[in-house]
Amino acid sequence: MKMYAEILVEIQNKHVDKTFTYHIPDNLQKEALVGKRVLVPFGNKKLEGYILKIKNDSDIETKDVLEIINEEPVLNDEMLDLGRFLQAKTLSSLCSCYNVMLPKALKASKKNNIKEKKVAYLKLTGDLDELLEKVSTSSQKDILKLFSNEQEVLKSRANQVSASAVKTLLKNGFLVLEEREVYRYQINEEENTQKKVLNDEQQKAFLEIKNSLGKKETFLLHGVTGSGKTEVYLALIEEVLKINKQALVLVPEISLTPQFVKRFNARFPNQIAVLHSGLSDGEKYDEWRKIIRDEVSICIGARSASFAPFKNLGIIIMDEEHSESYKQENNPRYHALDVLLKRSANHSCPLILGSATPRLYTMARASKKVFKYLALKKRAQNAILPEVNLIDMTEEVKNRHNILSEELECAIIEKINKKEQVMLLLNRRGHSTTITCSNCGYTYRCPNCDITMTYHKSSKNLRCHYCGYTKYIDDFCPKCYEKSLNYYGMGTEKLEEYLENVFPTAKIVRMDADSTTNKGMHEKIIKDFADHKYDILLGTQMISKGLDFPNVTLVGILDADASLNIADYKSNERTFALLAQASGRAGRSNKKGTVLIQTFMPENYVLQCVKNNDYAKFYQYEMNIRKTLKYPPFYYLVLLTFKSKDYESVSKEANKAKEFLNNKISKETIILGPTTANMFLVNGIYHFEILIKYRFDENLIKALKELDNLVLLNKKVTMDIDFNY
């Protein structure tokens, strides 16, 4: 019987965003299943793709499928449906939506060569004493003696004695070789931590969510920093496992994962898979297969773990739901929350959104009873919220305290003397942000992006944090050749250098994107600081949330105003979350915590709300501004970004798009632009933007699809569509 397959090939270009029909040869028909990866001829190439449909006839002439790649489907029914959901939600190509779900080893891509890791073991074929009598060389005897107290021996261990002797013993039938698969990622085992008794607030939240098990329901768990949200998660997952269901837990940062995983593993040993970008491609492949094989019941991971292929989810948890890392910044531009809401409906299970500083969008949904609101207003274990003080740097700078205020410097000394620990937040990496020649005025700028580059002193490199361009720098101006370079601005590298001079006896560690490039560095720094190998931990926003160090009693925040001055409607919301989360790292045990925030704008309402730990006041104030200016959650936004290496082409295309939209969409919909983007030139590419604000517009999606197809005709220009801007 003839069989044909509708196959989505790996080309992610929207021009070919469709399936192609292929004939399935007789010898492959038993293996051919929807969701499997296949190799097919495409033009003069061989490409991989996914089987989306199998049928018995075709009205066109077809080529043959060359190979079925996987034994099992890599896309189950739910994932196939999620891909179509993402395509409709983001207007991205269907292939990009499927590829974003899978680890690299399972994506449709001709570049994949990731296999299972096998370890070779040797076993005896007979009695040890009898075999020893039959061998003649000392090296063969030494290898056989390794089995005196063991049933099997690693081949690599035996090879250390003599690889040639191992070959001879195998050839003569004295040993047999057995290969077994091993998983590459291992959770560091720790002693079981004592199960904590939930306090009244935690118990109330636990019971409310427990009663919703088996139902599609979304909860906002709004708990102050240190209120014990994680204990509520653990108690709920315990209930879910009792009814033989599975749990999906998302965290926003790689830096959070080690502490989180260890805590969960102590409670649920050998039941956890981990998925995040810090793992190697092989490790991700192994963790994915643990889930597919039903070897684990819990997955902990970052955004990509949204797609973990569980078949029987009982609960979904999105911790630190306010984090921007839950939004993907390239195609498909999805937000993890949209995926989790869909999966919550698919599995009829509750979704918990946990945060001390919920997004305004989330709180607005809770206030309208779309999400159920649960509050944890007190810290667990009777810990007290830290005292937060704002330090006016205007006066400090006059007294030449440019980096650390006198109050913060004295507080650091006091804490170190008391054997307590300090965390310092400066949300800017590198050493200096601008280098200028005082003789001729020359300033180092990125040749691709036309912005100043950041100086990294440890490598003597200038680096563009937008396109990655790097340039070695010496002490002389490249224009006038004078030794007259001045270094302005400060990043974490420069702060570390300053701290080492001011506190020479203190042990200091830095945690930012530069100090954690090597695999495992996040975990090492966190463990070493928890073990008090360091007195001061300084870093960027990656240290601001989720981390729990009982001995940290002082948090200092430098340059708190920086994120307030960004031209973005979410800058106040981001700043409040960042500062409130960072403040929450102090005083998480029975020791009193203090937070000192250095600012040039101490009267700013955002900073005042952080000082008073007043989320409600911040929410009301910011919502009034959003309503007046017609921003989310009162309006939806779509950002269209037009990109090209040719300025005239992109400018012309953006203006044509504005004219097209004016004729196609509702008159109530607001179209702003086109205008140049904040980062106008990145990596030699010009960027123009159009911002669309709308409430209800039934014509918008259709118009955007038409516009997308029109822009595709211009080979010089591309357009990105961002619905979650």
Image (cartoon, rainbow, N blue to C red):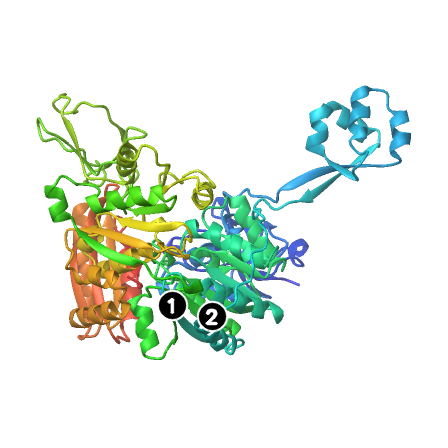
User: How many numbered tags mark residues here?
Assistant: 2
Residue found at the very far left of the displayed protein: 440
**Residue type indicated by callout 2:** Asn
Q: Read off the residue under disc 2.
A: 199
Q: Is residue 364 above or below residue 337?
A: below
Q: Residues within 10 Å of mark 1 (few under 14, many from 20)?
A: some
Percent x, y for residue 35? 56, 60
Which quadrant is home to the N terminus? bottom right
Which quadrant is home to the C terminus? bottom left
The one of 116 and 475 positioned closer to us in this rendering: 475
Q: In the picture provided, is 638 more to the left or to the right than 245?
A: left
Q: Are marks 1 and 2 in contact (CB under 8 Å)?
A: yes
What SS does tag 2 mark? loop
Residue found 21% across the figure and 59% down from its top: 607
Residue found 21% across the figure and 74% down from its top: 666
Q: In the picture provided, is 252 more to the left or to the right than 696?
A: right
The one of 493 and 483 positioned closer to us in this rendering: 493
- Res 61 visible: no
**Residue type indicated by callout 1:** Lys
Q: For residue 265, which quarter of the picture?
A: bottom right
Q: Read off the residue under disc 1.
A: 378
Percent x, y for residue 482? 13, 21
Q: For residue 329, which quarter of the picture?
A: bottom left
What SS does tag 1 mark? loop
